């Protein structure tokens, strides 16, 4: 029995998750550095500014909590046109590593009718969360709905029938975390992106 097994058998569940998250980071592979992420955010901002600067309807930026929080904080400051900031919280993961049914925790406070919306999230994996959010926004009669993600995952699994308008980077089909993306609720705060070490 190794030291981790001995220690973990005496810890409450929350502490076990915490120590497991530390171990995952210690063993993880670095995928994108802080500098690479910032360069990607600069390019995302340029693309968004070029597309939305001339829009005639007022713009609301809608980060999807909690994943879109970190990217939004960096990206919104680089937008060069007037925006209002709201948010929404819809999740399929709930601190797990596999997605389930979509759960709405908070819908936008502003009226979306006749507005241009920019939805921001951390990752586009299969796209079901983003699709549900876009469908909701359209049902509220938004005039235009755009989406931006930091990372899109490349994999052969079926994806939703939508694409993100603005994508920062692409990653292979591994479990990635950092810069908004979590591992069982931890590591969203990391200023880089890592992948869980493959066995």
Image (tube, helix red, strand yellow):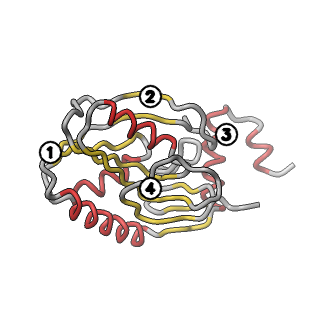
Front disc: 4 or 2: 2
What numbered label is drawn on residue 190? Answer: none
Residue on which the image places disc 2: 104
Q: Where residue 146 sits: x, y (%)?
A: 32, 50
Decide: few, some or many residues near mark 3? Use Cα within 10 Å; few <14, some 14-19, many ≥20.
some
**Which circle's residue, 4 or 2, is located before the other in the chain?**
2
Residue at image coords 44%, 43%: 130
Vertical side of 138 occupied by 4: above or below: below
* Front-lying residue, 168 or 76: 168
**Which circle's residue, 1 or 4, is located before the other in the chain?**
1
Q: CA distance from mark 1 to mark 2?
A: 26 Å
Residue at image coords 24%, 34%: 112
Decide: few, some or many residues near mark 1? Use Cα within 10 Å; few <14, some 14-19, many ≥20.
some
Left or right side of 170 for 174: right
> Do callouts 1 and 2 mark residues in contact (Cβ within 8 Å)?
no
**Which circle's residue, 2 or 3, is located before the other in the chain?**
3
SS assignment at label 1: loop
What numbered label is drawn on residue 179? Answer: 4
Residue on which the image places disc 1: 57
Front disc: 3 or 4: 4
Outermost residue, right direction? 1
> Do callouts 1 and 4 mark residues in contact (Cβ within 8 Å)?
no
Q: CA distance from mark 2 to mark 3?
A: 28 Å
Residue on which the image places disc 3: 16
SS assignment at label 3: helix
SS assignment at label 2: strand
Q: Where residue 111 sits: x, y (%)?
A: 21, 30
């Amino acid at each position: 029995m190794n030291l981790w097994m001995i220690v973990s058998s005496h810890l409450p569940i929350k502490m076990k998750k915490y120590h497991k998250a530390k171990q995952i980071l210690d063993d993880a592979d670095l995928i994108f550095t802080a500098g690479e992420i910032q360069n990607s955010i600069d390019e995302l901002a340029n693309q968004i500014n070029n597309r939305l600067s001339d829009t005639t309807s007022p713009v609301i930026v809608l980060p999807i909590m909690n994943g879109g929080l970190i990217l939004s904080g960096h990206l919104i400051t680089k937008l060069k046109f007037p925006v209002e900031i709201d948010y929404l919280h819809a999740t399929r993961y709930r601190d797990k590593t596999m997605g389930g049914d979509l759960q709405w925790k908070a819908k936008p406070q502003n009226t979306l009718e006749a507005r241009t919306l920019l939805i921001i999230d951390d990752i586009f994996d299969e796209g079901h969360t983003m699709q549900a959010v876009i469908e909701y926004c359209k049902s509220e009669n938004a005039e235009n709905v755009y989406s931006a993600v930091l990372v899109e995952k490349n994999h052969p699994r079926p994806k939703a029938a939508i694409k993100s308008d603005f994508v920062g980077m692409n990653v292979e089909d591994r479990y990635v975390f950092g810069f908004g993306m979590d591992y069982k609720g931890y590591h969203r705060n990391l200023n880089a992106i890592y992948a869980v070490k493959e066995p």
